Amino acid sequence: MDLEYSDKHKTLQKEVRRFIAEHGQQSPKTGGGRKRPDHQVLEWQRLLLAKGYVGRSIPPQYGGFGAEPDVLDSAIIAEEFNQTGLSPGLMNQGISMLVPTLLEVGTEEQRQRWIEPTIRGDIIWCQGYSEPNAGSDLAAAQTRAEMVDGEFIVNGQKIWTSSAHFADMMFLLARTEPDQPKHAGLSYLLLPVTTPGLEVRPLRTMTGRAEFNEVFFSDVRVPGDQIVMQRGDGWKVANVTLKYERTMIGDPGKAMNRLLRIRELMEETRVDGRRLIEWPEYRDRLLRLQGEVLAAKYHGLRLLSDQARGDDSGIGRQIVKLAGTQLGHRLSALAVDVLGAAGLNYEPRGEDVEDDNATTWHIDYMYDVGLLIGGGTSQIQKNIISERGLGMPREPKAANPATATGRGS
Ligand SMILES: Cc1cc2nc3c(=O)[nH]c(=O)nc-3n(C[C@H](O)[C@H](O)[C@H](O)COP(=O)(O)OP(=O)(O)OC[C@H]3O[C@@H](n4cnc5c(N)ncnc54)[C@H](O)[C@@H]3O)c2cc1C
């Protein structure tokens, strides 16, 4: 692994630094995504799109910047935004999961129609996968979509659907071929959340906020052409989306951003007249975590090098979600611990309590528990790593039908 940037990459780095110096004050706070993007977020997103700091390699005909794909460019941009604590642009299920899925397996018409408004933040998507009896074993989804006169008629229920209470559109995994084996009987449909018969009921998490939802379908009509790939291909498409979901959730850049915020907190906060960073037990924990964050960062760069060479990183890729979410949770645990009683203060720091994007370390800590589960639980990730990465014996199917061929695959 060569850690020196080429001249071309050094030039990009300088350009990004100049942009940040000139425009950084326009950045919204990081950590958004729990409500519809407001005016400031949308303006920032458009500025980043115009500069190619988001949607960099998305072709211009789909609203992107159209640069040649270069993984190091993306790494440099992410690093500069993370180091300065600026928002790297919108990161949501539409942009980070559906857009790359459409680029990989969507039709030309679907790309033309959905990608540009999604990356501009005009259309917000939610992911209709999990059901009360189909989480880790996602292929067991029972929500039915029956073809009648050229339309799918959807009936059933989804659960844990993040953002459905403010989303415009949903990508939905539904059973269209009930006679086929479970993995072959699913299809991947796109539909507006406002379609008659679709009801969204918010669920509160332990953060006190409604972050995900139950979604009920009663004779919801979806045009027959609102399908990605073909009938019965839903499992293939869903797994393309899941691949991008795991990368989004385990992103080492987020851990670095969080580490820097904690260091700042420990440098600025005094307890009994001493800065928190000077307390040996906390400093020790911070340094250990810093080592792990740096390991995650260099691991991410190694994966990028593999990607640039067209190599599959195998087990290296599989550990990102598990390691990234565990690290994120331990980082916010350190912040809550160092703040002691103050860490339990529920009021967002000097911010509007009603603002769903306002956050405290305490809220981050609780929210991060969800990230150990969402996108495939830590246990499922461990199954995948041990079975596919380390070649250990597969879980006996008879003992547990919810095998690692589920949500994590
Ligand atoms: C914050 C958050 C956001 C989410 N957002 C969405 C969303 O937007 N859209 C969506 O569709 N879903 C979403 N989910 C749902 C998420 O994908 C599921 O919760 C997850 O896949 C686990 O499914 P489950 O909750 O049904 O748990 P189950 O599958 O019932 O698992 C229960 C427990 O059993 C363990 N387990 C299950 N099978 C095995 C096995 N084979 N080996 C070992 N252990 C096993 C699990 O690890 C877990 O600890 C979200 C979840 C969270 C927490």
Image (spheres, helix red, strand yellow):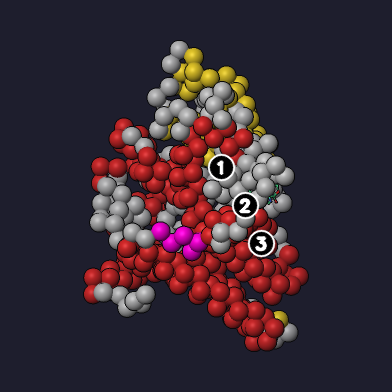
Q: Is mark 2 on a helix, strand or loop?
A: loop
Distance, label 2 to label 1, CA atoms, is 35 Å
Query: Mark 2 vs mark 3: which is more N-terminal?
Result: 3
Estimate the x, y position of residue 103 in percent, counting from the top left: 35, 43
The local secondary structure at tag 3 comes to: helix
Mark 3 = which residue? 365
Among numbered discs 2 and 1, the one appearing first in the sequence: 1
Compared across the picture, whether 273 is left or right of 263 comes to: right
Q: Is residue 205 above or below residue 138?
A: below
Which residue is denoted by mark 1 in the rendering?
A: 163
Give the residue drawn at x 45%, y 72%.
298
Check disc 1 and give the amino acid type: Ser
Q: Residue furthest right?
A: 341
* Magenta-colored span: 312-316
Image location (x, y in percent) of residue 25: 41, 65
Magenta region, mostly helix, strand or loop? Answer: loop
Q: Which residue is drawn at 62% across and 64% down?
A: 326
Few, some or many C-alpha atoms within 10 Å of disc 1 (few <14, some 14-19, many ≥20)?
many
Disc 1, ligand 1: is the CB inside 8 Å?
yes
Q: What element carries label 1?
A: loop
Of circles 2 and 3, which is in front?
2
Residue situated in front as seen by the camera: 206 or 220: 220
Q: How far apart are marks 1 and 3 (CA)?
A: 19 Å
Tell me residue 306's x, y (percent): 37, 64
Other-residue count near label 3 (Cα within 10 Å), few / some / many at <14 / 14–19 / ≥20: many
The verdict on residue 315 being magenta is yes
Q: Which residue is drawn at 27% across and 47% down?
A: 59
Residue 394's disc is 2
- 2 or 1: mark nearer the eye: 2
Mark 2: amino acid: Arg
